[in-house]
Every structure is written in C-alpha cells, then in structure tokens.
Image: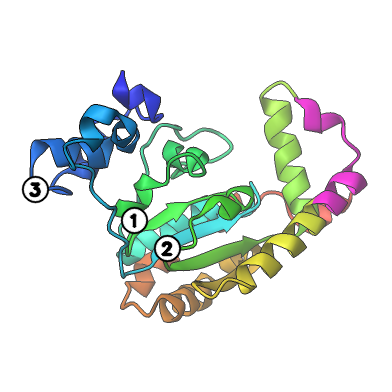
C-alpha cells in the first residue's frame, strides 16, 4: 500500500534493493524509502527524519524526444560498463525490440525525486519534457539525443498506427514539427543555463552510421574508461527504419 503511494507498488524487489543500506536503523530506512512519513506528528516528535544525502557523483541522464534514440544510448552505456537504473516495467516490443530501459519513478520526479539517491554515477532515461523537474541541488551529465524531426514524426506515426492511433495522429505534421523544434530550443537553452548540468548532444544518424566515433565521444564526456568495442557492437543499423528521405516521401 505504502509503495503504491510513491508509485512503485509493482516493483518491490527492485525498490527493496534500491534502498538497502541507505539508513542505519529500520525506522530511518523506512523514512528514506517513504519520505512522506516525515509529515506525521508522531514521527517528527521523535526527531527521526533524516536529511537526504546529495551524492557528489553526477547522475547520468539520457534524454531527448521520444523516438530519438534514447533506448539505443542506454544500451550502449550498459554495454560499455555503466550501471543503468531501469525497472523493466515496459517490455520490449516491435517498436523497441531491444527494450525501453525506463524507470517509472522518473515520471513522478516533481512529486518525489528520491530515486536520484541511487543514481549517482549511473544512467537513467528521461524524456526531455521531464528534465525541468530535476532538483537543482545536485550534478548531472546529460546525454541529449537528437534526431531529424521528420524521422521522429515518422517513427511516432508508425508507433501510433501499430497501436490503433491516438490524438496526435490527427495533428498536422508541420505543426507538430514546429512544436517539437520550439520545445527542443527551450529545453537545450535551459540545460545550458544550469551550472550543475553538463551536456553532450548526440545525433541519432551518426550513432547508427558511426557508432565507434559516438562511443568514444560519450566516454570522453563521461570521463570514464568504457568498453568501446562493446558499445559499438550493440548498435543495430537495421533499426534505423525511418530515415529523413522516407519521411519526406
């Protein structure tokens, strides 16, 4: 029940491992896991609420528009030796045959950002719209995936069609492309304005055609010794199914 209140009711084994050892005694561990309990008078009167530790090592955030290659980058990071945070809640399918690498708690970051306590030095996937919810009291390394907007639209349309359509399927492509472009401009400007965010922009097309080059660039950005051969090997060029030329035809 309590896990359901923080949106992690279906991920008990994962969340249990996640919080293990965060506090020295059972009550403090419970408060680390369920921070809303600190608002209860009986808890406050005992002076048991703990202050969340802000990790010194930055969290690695893989971001971008949906269908921009974020899952592919998560695969590369995992293959290269970076630990990822993912709950496996969203299974692989025809749209993402190698998996989505998502963490459901990310969607509720504005209400509860405690998942970040376990994210230091690890990679987590977060769509660009949610970046604005990240707390400003810690450091982040943002790998921002870019893709030709016509390819993004074509990929999203195929996904919608496969799933029976949706609201955005009826929006004019030119209008949607303009909205995406504006969103990207605002998001990238916002990231650049944040002193505790470092960012590298990685283009989907180059990742597919030159994965070795991108792997080296990402390793340099993260300042990590990574397995570049493994990072390169996981990239499947055959998955680049919605190229700009297709989108324009």
- Mark 2 or 3, nearer chain start: 3
Answer with left or right where residue 204 lies relative to residue 213: right
Q: Residue at x 75, y 52 (%)?
A: 151
Q: Is residue 101 above or below residue 185?
A: above
Q: Residue at x 51, y 33 (%)?
A: 93
Q: Nearer the viewer, mark 1 or mark 3?
A: 3
Answer with left or right where residue 23 lies relative to residue 131: left
Q: Is residue 249 above or below residue 40?
A: below
Q: Report x, y in % for residue 217.
A: 49, 79
Q: Is residue 170 magenta?
A: yes
Local SS, label 2: strand
Local SS, label 1: loop
- Mark 1 or 3, nearer chain start: 3
- Magenta residues span 166-179
Identify the residue position indicated by label 3 in the image: 24
Answer with left or right where residue 82 lies relative to residue 152: left
Identify the residue position indicated by label 1 in the image: 119
| Residue 123 shows up from this direction | yes
> Dot 1: within a 10 Å radius of its alpha carbon, few (fewer than 14), some, or many (20 or more) residues?
many
Q: Residue at x 47, y 74 (%)?
A: 218
Identify the residue position indicated by label 2 in the image: 60
Answer with left or right where residue 121 lies relative to residue 202: left
Q: Is the residue under label 1 in contact with that under label 2 (CB below 8 Å)?
A: yes
The majority secondary structure of the magenta stretch comes to: helix
Q: Report x, y in % for residue 234.
A: 43, 58
Q: Residue furthest front?
A: 45
Q: Is residue 206 above or below residue 1?
A: below
Local SS, label 3: loop
């Amino acid at each position: 029940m309590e896990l359901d209140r923080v949106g992690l009711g279906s991920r008990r084994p994962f969340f249990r491992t996640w919080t293990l050892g965060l506090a020295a005694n059972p009550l403090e561990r419970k408060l680390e896991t369920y921070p809303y309990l600190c608002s209860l008078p009986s808890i406050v009167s005992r002076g048991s609420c703990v202050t969340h530790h802000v990790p010194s090592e930055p969290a690695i955030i893989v971001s971008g528009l949906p269908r921009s290659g974020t899952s592919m980058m998560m695969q590369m990071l995992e293959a290269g030796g970076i630990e990822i945070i993912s709950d496996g809640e969203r299974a692989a399918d025809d749209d993402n045959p190698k998996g989505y690498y998502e963490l459901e708690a990310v969607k509720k970051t504005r209400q509860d950002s405690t998942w970040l306590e376990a994210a230091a030095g690890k990679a987590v996937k977060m769509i660009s719209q949610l970046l604005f919810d990240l707390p400003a009291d810690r450091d982040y390394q943002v790998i921002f995936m870019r893709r030709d907007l016509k390819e993004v639209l074509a990929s999203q349309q195929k996904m919608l069609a496969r799933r029976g359509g949706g609201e955005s399927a009826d929006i004019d492509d030119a209008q949607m492309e303009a909205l995406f472009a504006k969103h990207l401009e605002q998001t990238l400007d916002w990231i650049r304005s944040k002193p505790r965010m470092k960012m590298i922009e990685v283009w989907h097309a180059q990742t597919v055609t030159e994965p070795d080059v991108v792997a080296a660039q990402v390793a340099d950005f993260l300042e990590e010794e990574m397995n570049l051969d493994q990072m390169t090997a996981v990239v499947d060029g055959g998955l680049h199914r919605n190229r700009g030329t297709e989108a324009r035809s």
